[in-house]
Amino acid sequence: MLRPRRGDDPRVRGLSLRASGLLFRLLLCRSCTTFGAILGGPGALAEECGGADSKEFSEAFAELEKSGLVEADWQNRICFVTFVPEDDPPVNENMAKGRGRAVGDLPDCNLRRKIVAEILKHAGPWADEFSKAAANFGGVDTDEEPQEDEPEGTVSKPFGNRSGTVRRPS
């Protein structure tokens, strides 16, 4: 996820040892998505990122925010490692669709909108697939018309087969 050239980024090179360690641990924590969003409040992240006390975590995180490497919306319990969509863009249609679905799990806030914009900016030829998947899973608002209702004679099956529907017996 972290490209070797990122080490040459002056924002990374200027970090203290504690802040650079936190950045590395944020990228590797269980809660970090493939596009750099991390769900959790400061206490949970401090514990997940090595059990640092909250003061040390807050100081290191503030340094990362000041450098522009991360952003947080603690009220909605989400933070974002800002360079991940650029360093790790989707490389195929399925990756783009998966990220679109995952965006729907994020809380609705300004930071989610920024995350979506960053993913779209770096999605390349798969931006449309990402947008469609995100719209279907509540990740973005679109101007597209709603999808058609299910054909008559089918019943929604939320935990069903791959098509999501099952035919009624005739």
Image (cartoon, rainbow, N blue to C red):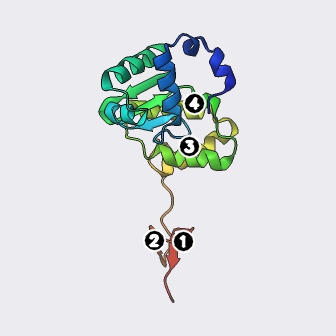
State the CA–CA distance, disc 3 to disc 4: 18 Å
Looking at the image, is 56 positioned above or below residue 96? above
Please identify, in this view, whether the residue under mark 3 or under mark 2 is nearer the observer.
2
- Front residue of 58 and 146: 58
Marker disc for residue 131: 3
Crowd class of label 4 (few under 14; some 14 to 19; many from 20; radius 10 Å):
many
Q: Describe residue 94's horizontal placement relative to residue 75 as left or right.
A: right
Q: Describe residue 43's horizontal placement relative to residue 21 as left or right.
A: left
- Answer with mark 4 or mark 2, whichever residue precedes in sequence: 4
Q: Look at the numbered disc 4 and give the secondary structure of its residue.
A: helix
Where is residue 124? Give x, y as percent: 68, 35
Crowd class of label 1 (few under 14; some 14 to 19; many from 20; radius 10 Å):
few
Marker disc for residue 84: 4
- Answer with mark 3 or mark 4, whichever residue precedes in sequence: 4
Quarter-of-image position of residue 100: top right
State the CA–CA distance, disc 2 to disc 1: 8 Å
Where is residue 19? Give x, y as percent: 47, 19
- Front residue of 76 and 170: 76
Seen at 57% across and 26% down, the residue is 83
Q: Look at the numbered disc 2 and give the secondary structure of its residue.
A: loop
- Answer with mark 1 or mark 4, whichever residue precedes in sequence: 4
